[in-house]
Image (tube, helix red, strand yellow):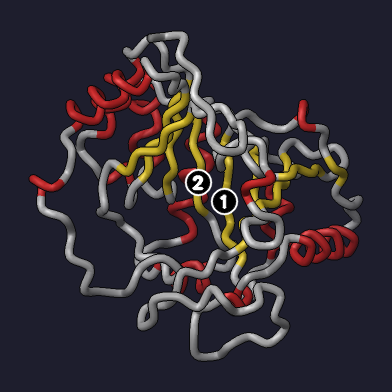
Amino acid sequence: MDGRVHHDGFGRNINYLRIAVTDKGNFRCIYCMPAEDVAPRVHDELLSAEEIARFVRLVAGEGIRRVRLTGGEPLVSRRIIPLIRDIRAISQIEDISLTTNGALLPKLASQLKDAGLNRVNISLDTLDPVLFEEITRLGRLEQTMAGIDAALAWGFEPVKVNCVVVRRLNQDVAALARLTVDRPIHLRFIEYMPIGDERTSSHCAVDPHAPTLNPALWDASDTVPSDEPRARVNAGAATVGLGELEPLDITDAPAGTGPARYWRFPGAEGTVGFISAMSNHFARAATACA
C-alpha cells in the first residue's frame, strides 16, 4: 500500500493530514472563540494518542506523508510529546508540523525536537502588547515572542509566523513584516475569513472588498485583501530606509509553502508571505495551507 497516490478534484496529490489533538486552549482569541460558555468535550469523545497514531499508520499506507497537529492549542495536551514520537516512528511519514500560539514553546521546544517534530507555525497578530492582550484575552506578547525565539534556538525549520489581518484591529503590519529582516522566520499575512461573530452564524455574503466597516458585526467587511497590507508593508519599509518587498521564485519559498505567495526585503533573513483566502481563492493554489 506504500505506493498509493490519491488526488482531489483539482488533481492535487493528497498527502497532507491535519489533526486537532485537543479542543482546549490557553488563549481565547476574539476572532475565533467567544469569551466564555464553550464547554470542552468530555474525555470519551476524543481519540486517545494511541488511536490517533493508529489512524496515521493507516492513512500513511494510503499516501499521507505530512502531518500537522493543531487544536485548540496542541501544547496544552499532555499527550502531545508521546503522540509526536509515535507518529515519527511511522516510516512513511516524512514531515510533522505543529500550529501553536507559542506560549509553551520555551518549556517544551527541546522535548518536541527530541520527539521528532520538524517545524512549527506560530500565531502572532500584533506587536502592540495592549492589542495582543485584547486579541488573545489571556495571552501576553512576551510569551509568543519567547516562543518564536525558542523555535529558532532549537532548530525547527522553517519557523512560520501567521498573522490574521482584521480591518477593525488596525494592526501595524509593517512592524510585523520587519521581524523578518534579522530573523529567519517566514511571516504570513492571512486574510480574515468571516464565519460569523459571537451572536450570529454567518455574514459571508458581504462583499469582502467592502470599504465600509460594519461597526456591530464581525463579518466580511473585516476582510483586508492582501494587496492592501502588502502596500502598507512597503510604505512602512520606505519610512525606515528599507527597500520594497521583492517577489520570490517558488523554488526559494520555505518548505510546505501551500497557497502563500512569498516576498522578501532586500538582504533579509526571512520572508513575508500573503495568503489570499478571500480575494484569491485556495482552489487556485497547488497545495493545502501548510
Quadrant, the N terminus: top left
Say what amino acid the circle numbered 1 marks. Asn
| 189, above or below 99, in the image | below
Residue farthest along the bottom direction in this orientation: 216
Query: In terms of sequence position, does the residue under pointer 1 or pointer 2 come before the other?
Result: 2
Q: In this view, does 269 lie to the left or right of 80?
A: right
Q: Mark 1 points at which residue?
A: 162
| 7, above or below 207, in the image | above
- Mark 2 element type: strand
Q: Residue at x 79, y 62 (%)?
A: 227
Crowding around mark 2 (Cα neighbors within 10 Å: few <14, some 14 to 19, many 20+) is many
Q: Is residue 271 left or right of residue 129?
A: right
Q: Mark 2 points at which residue?
A: 122
Percent from the top left, x then y, of residue 242? 88, 52
Spatial distance from mark 1 to mark 2, Cα to Cα? 6 Å
Between 205 and 157, the one nearer to me in the picture: 205
Q: Is residue 34 visible?
A: yes
Quadrant, the C terminus: top right
Q: Can residue 154 be seen in this view?
A: no
Q: Are marks 1 and 2 in contact (CB under 8 Å)?
A: yes
Q: Which residue is drawn at 89% across and 52% down?
A: 244
